[in-house]
Image (cartoon, rainbow, N blue to C red):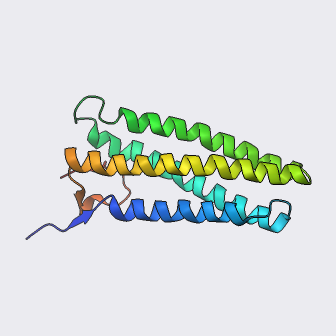
Amino acid sequence: MAQHRHEMYRPIHKAIRHMMYTTAHDLSVADFQGKRSADGALASLESTISLLVLRAGHEEEYVHIALEERPPRFIESFEKDHGNDELVYAQLRKLSSEVGNASGERKSELGNEIYDIYNQFAGIYVEHLYRRSMNCSRHCGTTLPTRNLALSTEPCRPA
């Protein structure tokens, strides 16, 4: 019987891009001087950061293990990206917390700063997704047997 295969990167990366673009939109239209508007945009930002942190952990625990057997330094750039991402997350979270303590024009300034940092980060992250898709498909294939999709203690094994 033929084994069912699942395209591993495209649907996940499409969902991440959508989430990131939605967050960028939320930040771009938010009036940071209005509590409700600022809170909504910052909640969107925190949800995005939390999901990206969770995804990075899953990647390191399940995907990178399977890729360690590939050419030397194959996953080093991806692991470095995750470290850089953590610095940006910390910076965005710090600025987000400052919004609650600021008043007047300072709230707008912080909102603009958050928006600028996030947009720059989103561009870098989308490029990371593209590199991952291209490099992994070139070196490992982009499909996995359906049985490897469940989050379990078993690492993903490329075909």
Res 67 → quadrant: top left
Tell me what residue is drawn at x 66 percent, y 65 percent. Answer: 26
Tell me what residue is drawn at x 67 percent, y 53 percent. Answer: 115
Q: Residue furthest top?
A: 72
Q: Residue furthest right?
A: 104
Tell me what residue is drawn at x 10 percent, y 69 percent. Answer: 2
Residue 104, percent across and down? 92, 54
Residue 22 visible (yes or no): yes
Res 21 → quadrant: bottom right
- The answer to whether residue 80 is above or below residue 148 is above
Query: Is 112 displayed left or right of 130 in the figure?
Result: right
Tell me what residue is drawn at x 54 percent, y 59 percent. Answer: 20
- The answer to whether residue 41 is above or below residue 121 is below
The front one of 135 and 64 is 135
Query: Is 34 displayed left or right of 19 in the figure?
Result: right
The front one of 104 and 67 is 104
- Looking at the rendered image, the quarter that the N terminus falls into is bottom left
Residue 11, percent across and down? 37, 65
Residue 72, percent across and down? 25, 28
Label count reads: 0
Residue 76, percent across and down? 37, 32
Q: Residue furthest left?
A: 1
Residue 157 visible (yes or no): no
